Amino acid sequence: MPNITLSVPADIHMIMKQHGEIRWSEIARRAISDYAKKLALLDTLTQESELTEEEVMALDEKVKEGIYKHYKRKQST
């Protein structure tokens, strides 16, 4: 299995050092694995897509706007 080196901010490193019982490399490995699997799924789902990047961005904005309106309505009730 290949190895990688990660850099973390000093404040995070101090917290990690306080919890030496935790296998941080395993947590990083799982997080990277989960993210990579999601990317692979997205690649598979979009492989046959004929949408342009501009169309995707426009759709993204519409979805975000709908979510915003939904939660804004929920807050006002």
Image (cartoon, rainbow, N blue to C red):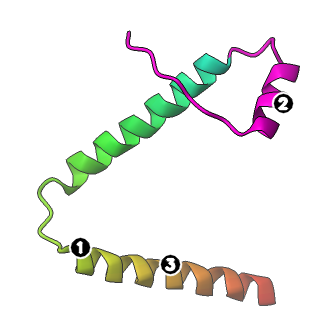
- Crowding at label 2, few (<14), some or many (≥20) Cα neighbours within 10 Å? few
> Residue 62, image x and y in percent?
42, 84
The tag on residue 64 is 3
User: Is 5 contained in the magenta span?
Assistant: yes
The tag on residue 31 is none
- The residue that disc 2 covers is 15
Tell me which amino acid carries mark 1. Glu
Tell me which amino acid carries mark 3. Lys
| In the image: residue 25, left or right of residue 74 | left
Tell me which amino acid carries mark 2. Ile
For the residues labelled 2 and 3, say whether their Cβ atoms are less than 8 Å apart: no
- The residue that disc 1 covers is 53
| In the image: residue 39, left or right of residue 22 | left
Q: Main secondary structure of the magenta part?
A: loop
Is 74 located above or below residue 32 in the figure?
below
Q: Spatial distance from mark 2 to mark 3, Cα to Cα?
A: 35 Å
